[in-house]
Amino acid sequence: MSDPEDTGADAGAESGPDTRADTGEGATRCGYVAVVGAPNAGKSTLVNGLVGAKVAIVSPKVQTTRTRVLGITVEGASQLILVDTPGIFAPRRRLDRAMVAAAWDGAADADVVLLIVDAAARKVGADAWSIVDTLAASGRPALLALNKIDATPRDRLLDLSARLNERLAFARTFMISALSGDGVADLRSHLAGAVPAGAWLYPDDELSDMPMRLLAAELTREQIFRKLHQELPYAITVETEDWQAFEDGSVRIAQVVYVQRDSQKAIVLGKGGQMIKAIGSSARTEIAKALDQAVHLKLHVKVRPNWVDDPERYSPWGLDPNA
């Protein structure tokens, strides 16, 4: 048995970084691409599509992503380190402030900033305009991707592009559908040429730097978002408490779903425990896909009042509780 506390989400991490750029000046490129945008713009869907695997959870609800997630992919001689950031919005709670701070930190540290805007929305929201204005004030070049073009009339796309570029002259504008992949190949090719020359920072078979324990917890939280249609998911967090790998290749995972009140616990459990069983079944399937191995998943639901104000809960996500 083993405990993967500090193991990356993909095998091969022990092989060390790729140093093939040393064989010739500019032979390879490598850089960080911060994917920013308002909540539910499609950032995580795009990152997963570019990586070719699920490294960030996705749901129709806003504010699903709580931390910066690195997705790693190779395009030709370029290694792209995609930083899927939490949605940027006007924060109200401590957790909100920490998430937004993490998003802007990801943008500040990146070599390339890519703004995703939901083109299918009825209008460009205040959060998106605020991001555009902040990027403009920073003076940093940025790329724009209008997402969900498969659900948007062409004349609206052209009008959106013109209005956004009037506010900030983007280095280039892309029309994409992160869900179908339409236009993503052109974006990927451009990003490969936009990152700086240099040695790769990760092995060429690594897809993310997220520890498996955290990835598994996030995949379970994704299923909670999908199955509970009230505001309850925002009051929930999931932590992996135990992880045991066996010689037959299977793994047994024990997780705790924390809620803030007894009434919330009852909702998560469901009548006769049916809801938590459904969540566990779906989560087990997704975790098994991500790990490529058989998974035995045990979920417990516990009440932890005001966990959102507990600084220790922020540590697994890499968030600053004092942001």
Image (cartoon, grey):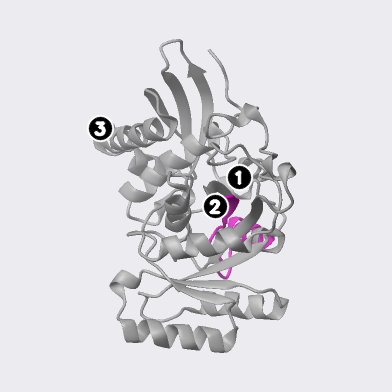
Q: Residue at x 51, y 61 (%)?
A: 189
Look at discs 2 and 3 and give the one toward the viewer. Answer: 2
Image mark for residue 73: none
Please state which of residues 203 and 301 is positioned toward the viewer in this rendering. 203
Look at discs 1 and 3 and give the one toward the viewer. Answer: 1
Amino acid type at mark 3: Gly
Is 88 magenta? The answer is: yes
Q: Secondary structure at mark 2?
A: loop
Q: Quadrant of the C terminus?
A: bottom right
Identify the residue under disc 3.
272
Q: Position of residue 245 (x, y in %)?
A: 49, 17
Disc 1 crowd, CA 10 A, few/some/many (<14, 14-19, 20+): some
Q: Position of residue 284 (x, y in %)?
A: 36, 31
Q: Secondary structure at mark 3?
A: helix
| Mark before the other along the chain sequence, 1 or 2 | 2
Disc 3 crowd, CA 10 A, few/some/many (<14, 14-19, 20+): few
| Mark before the other along the chain sequence, 1 or 3 | 3
The reply to whether the C-beta atoms of the residues labelled 1 and 2 are less than 8 Å apart is: yes
Above or below 308: residue 195: below
Amino acid type at mark 2: Arg
Residue numbers of the magenta segment: 76-105
Image mark for residue 317: 1
Distance from the alpha carbon under mark 1 to that under mark 3: 32 Å
| Mark before the other along the chain sequence, 2 or 3 | 2
